[in-house]
Amino acid sequence: MMKSRQRRLAGRFAAALLLALGCVSLANAQGSRILVRNAELVLTMDPQLGQGELGSLEKADVLLEDGRIVQVGKKLPASGATVIDASGKIVMPGFVDTHTHLWQSMIRDCGTDQTVVGWLSACMRDVGPRMTPEQTYAAVRLSIFDAITTGVTTVTDWSHAFNAGFANADLRALTDSGLRFVFAYCFDPAQEGNIRRVKQEVIDHNPLAHLQLCGIARSGNEAVLAGMVRLADELGVDTNVHLHENIADRQNGQIASLEQAGAIKSNLMVNHAIHLTDEEITLLASRGVRVAHCPLSNMRLASGVIRMPELLQAGIKIGLGLDGGTNDTTDMFNLMRAAVGLQRASRLSATTPPTVAQVLRMATLGGAEVLGLEHEIGSLTPGKRADLIVIDPEAANFAPKVDWPSQIVFNGQPRNVETVIVGGRLLKARGKVLGISEAVWVEQAERLRKPLD
């Protein structure tokens, strides 16, 4: 009976995968022309296109062609275009997740009473290194399904790359997904050959793909960090590290190790950056370092509250990150609420940054800036990649209409995301992720998780 069930699940998985590939190739062929028509509100994130900080336009259309945004305006011609009726709805750039670990869907339930120190030992280091390529692929695809559901169009996957097989399976899942992604490959001298191969054979041939090199900042790891910096400079990619997530990190010499390795410069982005001194904030700002803020993870792990007003005052660019298995919910709306709420609760002020406009920008164009991709994504500026979402506000959790930008942040849920388009390709339509059923990835994860218990 067990073998029969496994064959049945495998058959369903294969059939769904073939269906997915067929749907993507037939429904979203490159060169297609799409008109998103008659949106009640378009938040372009480009003040030159519309009103205010968010570049707002009412009763407007967005025209896409060859994977790029061609025009934003009223009553655009529909000739030769597939029309998506956005009447009564909100159109905006897709969300940019600046920091996550997609494989960690396998450890969502773990260490719920631990800080990051205990969680790393009990959860990540126990499970991750034992995962097979098949388990890794399934875990990443499950997380990606979740990300598309909430309107994420660009994801930054900080892959721990425990071994080359793990890294390759992680990257293959990303490549198969249709999402735009930044693959942060953790540098290991033993894997340098595979990193070079990945860059040349996979990343460079995929317009949706970008590479970063990531590393562990701590005293005694300077030689590896220097190797990361050297290879990143050679390949022309950014570097990415966790920095002062937990108060205990202040004893690990993270800033000193990064400085000694020559890493603190404009191609560095850091995650969390909670326990920074004034002097360290000034240093990071002066070198052009960017920050991924992960408020839901920070709350779950009792890590603390980022000094956002001081970072913004110093001119540091900030994006938002879902942060994998310690987020517990792939929900960009909840993430924006938490980013606002943490600052208000800790500062006892309802006007402290981020404002509604600021947090919406962090989730879109601000995230693109953190990734160095602001010239490609993050706003609906003509010429940029056609990554956008359509939000349906006509739902019990959202209606009635009062102030839609504020309602996106404070009332929005993943179920309000009706349409997701990445590079001109539909990944979600009429509220459903296209091409493959949710049940398939849930079944795969359930089956493959058991051997890791």
Image: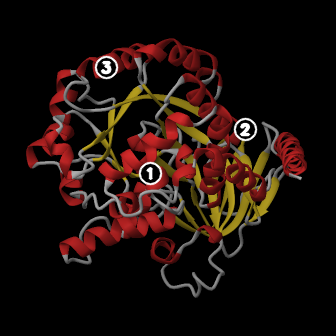
Q: Residue at x 29, y 62 (%)?
A: 302
Q: CA distance from mark 2 to mark 1?
A: 32 Å
Residue 226's x, y, as percent? 28, 18
Q: Residue at x 55, y 44 (%)?
A: 103
Give 298 or 87, whichever is nearer the viewer: 298
Residue most toward the front? 1
Q: Residue at x 37, y 51 (%)?
A: 119
Q: How many marks?
A: 3
Kindly indicate whether the residue at mark 3 contacts the one at mark 1 (C-beta within 8 angstroms). Answer: no
| Residue bearing mark 1 | 323
Above/below status of 68 relative to 407: above
**Mark in front: 2 vs 1:** 1
**Mark in front: 3 vs 2:** 3
Residue 352's x, y, as percent? 24, 70
Q: What's the residue type where badge 1 is placed? A: Asp
Residue 349 quadrant? bottom left
Q: Secondary structure at mark 1?
A: loop
Position of residue 413 in the picture relative to residue 216 (left or right) = right
Above/below status of 378 relative to 52: above
Q: Residues within 10 Å of mark 3 (few under 14, many from 20)?
A: some
Q: Secondary structure at mark 3?
A: helix
Q: Residue at x 10, y 48 (%)?
A: 278
| Residue bearing mark 3 | 224
Position of residue 383 in the picture relative to residue 100 (left or right) = right
Q: Which mark is residue 66?
A: 2
Residue 112 appears in the rendering: yes
Residue 209's x, y, as percent? 58, 32
Q: What's the residue type where badge 2 is placed? A: Asp
Residue 413's x, y, as percent? 57, 71
